[in-house]
Image (spheres, rainbow, N blue to C red):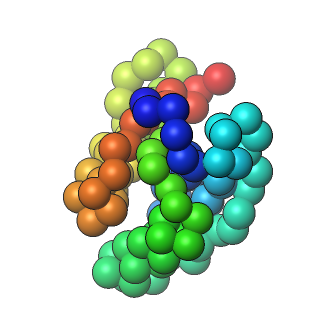
Amino acid sequence: MTDAGRVMALDLGDRVIGVALSDPTRTLASGLCGLRRTTLPRDLDALRGIVAEHEVKHVLYGLPLKLDGRESLQTRKTAKLAAQIEQALGLPMESVDERW
């Protein structure tokens, strides 16, 4: 991950995408909003708007694994959506294990 610019963290749910942002120095992060999911194009437009407004340079997203580390249906759905977001935003994305 590069050292400059804000990081946006996403919690990719089926109904809501939780959004948090770091400060420009990547010292602190706080919740920004919960985007109610509608259609993929609208969801992507909303994320593009946040990226542009806040000059986001990198995106993290939580990867919901089973407690034993195996993938689940939700893991695969999340990874698919993350790939679509990465393509739409043109920013580097990185998954974070959200088990613990």
Q: Quadrant of the N terminus?
A: top left
Q: Residue at x 70, y 48 (%)?
A: 23
Percent x, y for residue 37? Answer: 49, 76
- Drawn side of residue 53 relative to residue 21, left or right: left
Q: Quadrant of residue 53?
A: bottom right
Percent x, y for residue 63? Answer: 46, 37
Residue 77 makes an appearance in the image: no
Q: Residue at x 57, y 49 (%)?
A: 6
Front-lying residue, 55 or 90: 55
Front-lying residue, 28 or 77: 28
Q: Is residue 24 above or below residue 41?
A: above
Percent x, y for residue 39? Answer: 37, 82
- Drawn side of residue 58 relative to residue 15, left or right: left
Q: Quadrant of the C terminus?
A: top right
Q: Residue at x 48, y 76 (%)?
A: 49
- Drawn side of residue 35 relative to residue 87, left or right: right
Front-lying residue, 38 or 69: 38
Front-lying residue, 76 or 1: 1
Q: Is residue 26 above or below residue 78?
A: above
Q: Residue at x 53, y 21 (%)?
A: 67
Q: Is residue 40 above or below residue 79?
A: below
Residue 49 makes an appearance in the image: yes
> How many numbered marks are there?
0
Percent x, y for residue 91? Answer: 34, 51
Q: Is residue 29 above or below residue 71?
A: below
